[in-house]
Image: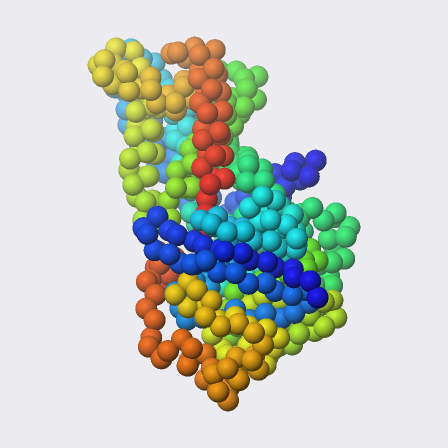
Amino acid sequence: MSAIIEVEHLTKKFDDGTVAVDDISFSVEQGSIFAFLGPNGAGKSTTIKMLTTILHPTEGVVHVGGADVHENPSEARRAFGIVFQDPSLDDELTAYENLDFHGALYGISKKEREKRIDDMFEFVELSNRRDSLVKEFSGGMKRRLEIARGLLHHPRVLFLDEPTLGLDPQTRNHLWRYIADLNASEGITVFFTTHYLEEAERIANKTAIIDHGKIIASGTVEELKQNTGAATLEEAYLSLTGKSIREEEGSARDHMRAMHRAWRGGKR
Amino acid sequence: MYSLNVIYVLWLRQIKRYYRARSRVIGSLAQPLLFLVALGYGFGPVFAQAGQGNYLSFLVPGVMSMSIIFTAMFSGIEVIWDRQFGFLRETLVAPVSRLSIMLGRTLGGATVATGQGVIVFFISLLIGFRPTSWGLFIPAVLIMFLVAMLFTAVGTAVASRLEDMQGFQLIMNFLIMPLFFLSGALFPLNDLPSVLATIVRIDPLSYGVDALRGLLSGSAFFGLGLDVGVLAGVTVLFLAIGGYLFSTIEI
């Protein structure tokens, strides 16, 4: 099997001197489901940002779908779809318009777009809400719509940054079922992060654990459990990363979100 | 062809958002109306006594410019909004050039701002304003669009450097307000104290107000040629700066 994501000596040092990601290397095989785990502030999000071309690495090389994300971002971008941790839909547009916008950005012709959007709505079971404004959607519906959007342009890799955060167990099960289906039927490589370790244990073929900017363990779930003598992935994870609670600074974004929620009556 | 399509969908998005926020549109027309009625009628007699003619017809191009600069700057600043609520990331991971994203947004924002200017023009007709010639309405719309492009680009440039809405009040008080009040939108430019006269000449909005006044009220101070030249030059400059700053955004 060949690698579809290759990361070599990736480092990100921010202006204030903090090293968020410290010389990590790993690869993800084509067609696999890869769980990228780690405590808050360990460097997960920074790594995903660099993998998906929105943050420039300080050092190191990343290939996604065979394209260097720095040298040839457009080709890399075509190869992946992404569902961000926070919603990234336009609330003032309808579900259909959000997908149509995405399709146009990715250069899909009008005719092909229409058909693909229909298929995607069916896949995430939102066909009956296609013309509703996104601001009327619940958190779970938004997440499903984002998955539909991430898949619209036939990516070979799907990045999911904590896709099930804040969703009820029913919706979470549903989402993982879609993702497993997709992986099985179309061979899409899935790269995801989560704090729900039982989900990672159930669905991932391979995993890597990052802490303090370094990869501290990687392999199959079984290997991780064996190496640490743990019964579950969660135990293995805790024995590797320790039990102390990590502090993450509240960002400006959290602040804005809180303000926005206050104004809009907390429907988000 | 492909980048044209990208520019088009981003333009369309701005238009749709504007159209859907009708309550906001109506709200944003209250301020120009207030300026027209309170200042236009209020200062009218004094202005006429000073031998300057009809204040309302002097003021209308200024208030139209006000409406355009506010809407245009806010459209530019929407970049911060999109950054906060995530939509910016959707456009930044798409396989298209940052420049075409910026151009599409700016054209959309400028179209909306021009629309606001045109609406204010029609409102002013209701309260008694008459343009010197209807034939010059279309050239006036083109000037409005140029002014709108300029300030949407300025807004985008500023917003590309800001993380959150904390900087918003700063932009409002130290950029939009001075640009508007020091542009000659409200007062005639002849016989100004020299410091103010210099500041007015530095403010690009002055040339927009002046051009509109020349076309709609028949009295340009700088002259239409200089107005258009300055506006076009500064617009290109800020499109370049805005395009560059937008392309360096990291999230």
Establish if B130 lies above or below B159: above
Could you tell me if residue A197 is visible in this image?
A: yes
Which residue: 45% across, 54% down? A11
The residue lying toward the viewer, choosing from B193 and B219, is B193
Residue B115 point in image, percent of width and height? 52, 34
The residue lying toward the viewer, choosing from B151 and A30, is A30
Residue A167 point in image, percent of width and height? 51, 75
Q: Quadrant of the N terminus of chain A?
A: bottom right
Q: Is residue A183 left or right of residue B40?
A: right
Q: Which image quarter: residue A33?
A: bottom right
Which residue: 28% across, 20% down? B199
Residue B41 point in image, percent of width and height? 32, 27
Establish if B154 lies above or below B86: above
Q: Is residue B104 left or right of residue A40?
A: right
Could you tell me if residue A263 is visible in this image?
A: no
Give the mark count. 0
